[in-house]
Image (cartoon, rainbow, N blue to C red):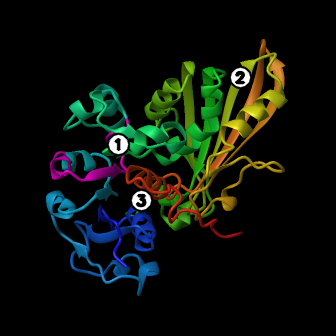
Amino acid sequence: MSKRFKAAVIGGSGYGGAELIRRLLHHPEVELVRVASVDFIGEPLCAVHPNLEGRTDLKFEGISPAEAAQGMDVVLLGLPHKVSATKMPELMASGARVVDLSGDFRLRDPAAYKRYYGADHPCAEHLTGGTFVYGLPELNREAIRGARYVASPGCFATAIELALLPLAKAGLLGGPVEIVGITGSSGSGIAPSAGTHHPVRASNLRTYKPLDHQHIPEIVLTLEGAGARDLTLRFVPVSAPIARGIFATCFAHVAADTTAEQLKNVYATFYSNEPFVRVPAKRLPEVVAVAGSNYAEVGLQVGDISDGKRAVALFSAVDNLIKGGAGQGIQSMNLMLGLDERLTLEDPGGWP
């Protein structure tokens, strides 16, 4: 049976590309037509992604963005930061819709991009002009439906924004917020490095980019746009001895007269109709409950009053490669194409 839409993946040899491919191969409405890469050209996809053995005859193609996009309804980018932006003018000229998993179009300020990504943006007019819709469906669902270009959120950003978004929308989020985010090694990408080397990672915890992670301006921009006031974000990321998953703990303060029941109702109501965000009733979020899936879990613990404010700890867990990456990109793609956003994303992952 012929499918309604055609898709290409550019940058298909990485972990994010692998998840894009996996989801597209069994999509009922979207056909994966080609996969472009600068590596493994001419080799079958299973040469890099062994889980795809026997699932497709597609091979990695060394083709230009224009060639990859030719005849496509949508192009999904699994390219690194600073590379994606150089391909975008050619892709925009193709007329295809684009979902970009990199950080190249999430910000609005070219100076902030240079500060956190270490380079001048090659097409900064698309930052300041708002060409890209930020692809967080729980915040921007209707804008994504009408978008031609989507910048999919970062993995840490997704976890932290989902933890804090209900507070921001309720007008309860402001002032300093402290965050510790723990992440698995796959977030560092497919290329081996000192930070992902197994003997160092397997029994270790260490921080990196403390108070200076590139997702900070993205998170602040998103939450202030959702209603946060005078927000100051202090974020410390931590590498953990797991392959997949992010667990974020956010410490915030609300007005002293805000009760635990009110806060729990804010979260239960905000996420009551969201297909991929759960607020567990009998436990707090945990990584193994969402690993391998597009689901996120969010929870909270309400504390005592100090200095006229009530302390609140917010917790969230996501799979960094799926809800924090490729799965969320597929969710946005579904919305852009007028499809049910849940297509190919409802599998719950494994346990344990």
Furthest residue in direction top, as rendered: 308
| Image-quadrant location for residue 8 | bottom left
Q: Secondary structure at mark 3?
A: loop
As drawn, is 146 to the left or to the right of 93? right
Write down the region rendered in magenta.
89-106
Query: Which of the two discs, 1 and 3, sits closer to the camera?
Result: 1
Q: Which residue is mark 3?
A: 189
Rendered image quadrant of residue 304: top right
- Residues at marks 2 and 1, CA–CA distance in whole angstroms: 35 Å
Of the pair 334 and 105, the residue shown nearer to us: 334
Residue 95 x, y percent position in the rendering: 20, 50
Say which residue appears at 55% left-offset and 43% top-offset. 237
In the rendering, which numbered label is found on residue 147?
A: 1
Q: Earlier along the polypeptide chain: callout 2 or callout 3?
A: 3
First along the sequence among labels 2 and 1: 1
Residue topped by disc 2: 253
Q: Residues within 10 Å of mark 1 (few under 14, many from 20)?
A: many
The residue drawn where x is 20% and y is 36% is 123
Q: Residue at x 30, y 45 (%)?
A: 148
Q: Callout 3: few (<14), some (14-19), or many (20+) C-alpha neighbours within 10 Å? A: some
Q: What amino acid is at disc 3?
A: Gly
Residue drawn at 49 percent across, 33 percent down:
219
